[in-house]
Structure formats: structure tokens, C-alpha cells
Amino acid sequence: MNTWIRTAVWGLLGSTTLGMVIGQSAALALPQSEIVTKLERVPVFLILNGDGQPLTVSPSEERQDAKFPVVFMDAQEAEEALDNAREQDTNAQIALLDLGTLYEQTQTDEGEVPLMYFPEEDELQAATTLQEEFRGVPLFLARQGSDGPYLTINQNGQSSLPVFFSRQDLQSLLDRFLQQNAEVTAEDISVQVLSLEWLLQAMRSNDDPALDEQLQQIRLFPSSDVLQYVRSQIAEPDSGADGVTPEAE
């Protein structure tokens, strides 16, 4: 199990760079291989029973006949779910893998296997301060003003659009940006939130060339707290936002 976990997240933490190819004429929707590449940086957690089957839940009271695998974005909440699961199955355990691998495995000839994503509670609360009715796994990004250019980062000559699973991690990048750009104030920056579920759907089926170009530029940054947990499990190097230069485009 430990060997499999190490293999699953090796690509996640083994490098601090992510190559981004931004074409002059964007194709409609992203190819699956590019979606997987973007997602494989993100650790997620599943609860497996003694037979290796994932914990499932019904999406609503009205759909008790449907059972979807549960995907946790936060290690602590996964561990709490594991404690509950072990009350019925002492052999239950947490499986750590990257979101790219999980996404790829859910794409079948019969269609996509539906998943239930459980957001981290504090991040969900942060999202509702931006959108009161927000639902889903929140992703945070910043732009200058309400409709100005998005904040981008540059690493090894590659420019990309950073999207964070952690509101605080985004704030750390904004603090650096403001320090480096004295002419810009915090009031000039607008933090926005979108859902992981929306992003996955957009990358898979978008037909807007302008949006498609933005989707190609996106670089996902997992929560630094989650990466710290992963490092504590497998002791690999960091893959966070250190060493990147924030800028506006």
C-alpha cells in the first residue's frame, strides 16, 4: 500500500515546475491528457473498506438508490470519516492518490463515473463570504478590479494563471504581489471563487475559444496544509508556489 501511494503522488511532489503550452488558436475543450496533467498535482483522499471498495454516499435524500464514491479534499476530514468507517469495518483505510489519476479512471466507455467531492469546511466558509450561495469545492483566484487582468505567475519563463484550493495560500501570493508592485493596493485586487466541479465540466466540454485559452493557462495549487500532510506521509519535496513570481497580465 505504501509503495502504491508513493507512486501515485510521485509526479505530484517530485518537481516544482509545470509546463504550460498556450497555443495561438485555442482548441475547443481540453484534451483528456491535458486535463489529467493539470489535475495530477492535486492530492485527494478516499476511504476504502477491507475489500478495497470506496466509501459511497447518496447525493440526496431523494436519491437513496444512487451511491457515489466519496472524494475528500482534506486529510483531517478524511481521517474523521475513517474513524467512523472503522466502527463498521476495522480494516478500512485511507487511500491517497492524485486527482488526475482519479479523473482518468472515472472516464469510461459508458460515460463518466459520478463522484461526490467533500470540500474542506474552512475553505467552503471562505467561499461563501464571496458567493453566499456557493456550493462545491471552492477554488480561488485573483484579478485587478472586478473585470481587469487576472493575476498570473511566471516560473522558468512560463506564465500561468494560478488557481488555489486554499484562500490563505492565495492571500500569501497576493501579499508578495503587493510588496513587489507598490502602485497596486489591496483595494485594487478582487478575489473570485469558482467550483472544482464547474472547472472540470468546463475543461471537458467548453466551446468558447476565449474561455478555452484561459483554461489552458490554469495551474492548480493544492492546499499547503494538504501538501504538508502528504509530506509527513511520504517525505518528498514541496510542490507549492515557492519560487514563482506573481504578476498581472
Image (spheres, rainbow, N blue to C red):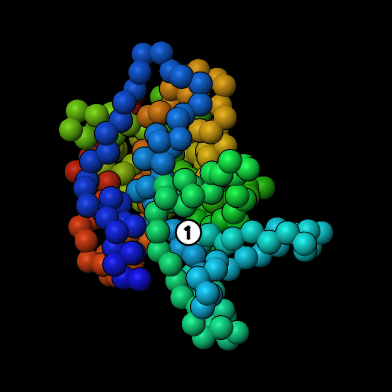
Q: Residue at x 41, y 41 (%)?
A: 36
Which element type, helix, strand or loop, lies under badge 1? loop
Residue at position x 56%, y 27% from top? 206
Residue 96 is situated, as x and y percent measured from the top left of the image, at 40, 64
Q: In the rendered image, is residue 16 in sight?
A: yes
Give the position of the C terminus as an image quadrant. top left
Q: Is residue 83 visible?
A: no
Where is residue 153 shown, x and y percent of the image? Answer: 29, 34
Q: Nearer the viewer, residue 225 or 60?
A: 60
Above/below status of 178 relative to 167: above
Q: Residues within 10 Å of mark 1 (few under 14, many from 20)?
A: many
**Picture coordinates of residue 208, whole percent (x, y):** 55, 20
Residue 144 sits in quarter: top left
- Toward the viewer: 74 or 28? 28
Between 222 and 140, the one lying in front of the other is 222
Compared to 44, does 153 lie above or below? above
Amino acid at the residue labelled 1: Met
Q: Is residue 28 above or below residue 162?
A: above
Q: Position of residue 157 (x, y in %)?
A: 19, 28
The reply, left or right, for residue 10 in relation to residue 194 is left
- In which quadrant of the rendered view does residue 158 lie? top left
Residue to which mark 1 is pinned: 73
**x 17%, y 33%: residue:** 156
